[in-house]
Amino acid sequence: MIAHKNHLELIARSAVVLPDRATELQLLPESRQRTRERATGQELVTALAHTQADIHAALRMVYEAYLETGLIGENPFAMRVTPYHVLPTTNVFVASRDEQLVGTLSLVRDCALGLPMEDVYSAEVNSRRACGKSVAEVTCLADSSHGKSNMLSVVIQLMSHMAQFARRQGVDELLIAVHPHHVGFYERFIGFEVIGHEKRYAAVQDNPAVALALDLNGLSVNHPRAYQRFFGKPFADGELQAHRMDSATIALLLRVLNQTEWKPTEARSESLLSAA
């Protein structure tokens, strides 16, 4: 799921964790693929994260946002990590201004292990697959809004980058679990539709969630404005190519996972960790 610190405070579903401060200080900035937009006089950059520095910073931001909104408890690593983050079917997107991280989200594409939200919405997800649709879940959405009205542009550009990447990967439909208070925003502004009624979500402290779906193939007809927001400015081919995390980053995330309280159903947890 998803969480913002203010206007888009959506629930999330992921795991918790992080390397120590000494490790963080050793992480050096690295070049990454980007797209640029002028926003409030500053350059907005979105990218597919793959370096340890980018992924570490993104998952720390998610942890801080979720902690502040009561979606998770504290953990000694200060990162929000799930087993899905170590799989090649998951990609982390980041947004920054003046080299400062201002937003992030993760896209979990479907695979033999399924999607995170299936812990609560298994029947709903399976019904989409039964229709022959290729699905992916949007999760771990967080920003550093602190009441700034211009953060909506960050969320939109992140989701635009993610949607174009998803289409490139053959995804037909995006799924998401959000807090009931934010269903209207996703329906009106982005074009999602409800596919699952409100349920308690154990992974986010039993906060309520509602399952939504966005048909990427029919978006231009069903919601032309949302289509324009997401696909009106095409990203370059190079900006839509994923890079596999290096073995050191994967090993770090696995070490963190082994020491955190993230718990899907027991059977799914074992299969996820073995697959990684």
Image: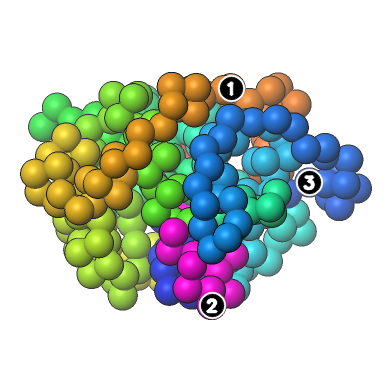
Find residue 174 and report its horizontal and vertical position in percent.
Answer: 28, 42
| Residue 34 placement (x, y as % from top left) | 56, 35
Instruction: Name which of mark 3 and mark 1 comes first in the sequence.
Output: 3
Q: Is residue 129 visible?
A: no
Q: Is residue 254 left or right of residue 89?
A: right
**Which numbered tag is attached to residue 147?**
2
The residue under label 1 is: 244
Measured in 3D between alpha carbons, the distance from the residue under mark 1 to the one under mark 2, in whole angstroms, is 34 Å
> Residue 198 lies in magenta, yes or no?
no
The residue that disc 3 covers is 19
Please name the amino acid that badge 1 sits on.
Answer: Arg
Q: Earlier in the sequence, mark 2 or mark 3?
A: 3
Residue type, numbered disc 2: Gly
Q: Which residues are magenta?
A: 138-153
Residue type highlighted by circle 3: Pro
Q: How many discs appear?
A: 3
Taking the view exactly as shown, the residue that stands out farthest to the front is: 41
Q: Nearer the viewer, mark 1 or mark 2?
A: 2
Q: Position of residue 130 (x, y in %)?
A: 13, 31
| Separation of marks 2 and 3 at Cα, in angstroms | 29 Å
- Tell me whether the residue at label 3 lies in contact with that at label 1, contact meaning CB atoms closer than 8 angstroms: no
Quote the CA–CA distance across marks 3 and 1. Answer: 20 Å
Dot 2: few (<14), some (14–19), or many (≥20) neighbours within 10 Å? few
- Residue at x-position 14% and y-position 27%: 132
Task: Tell me the residue at 31%/70% (across/down).
Answer: 182
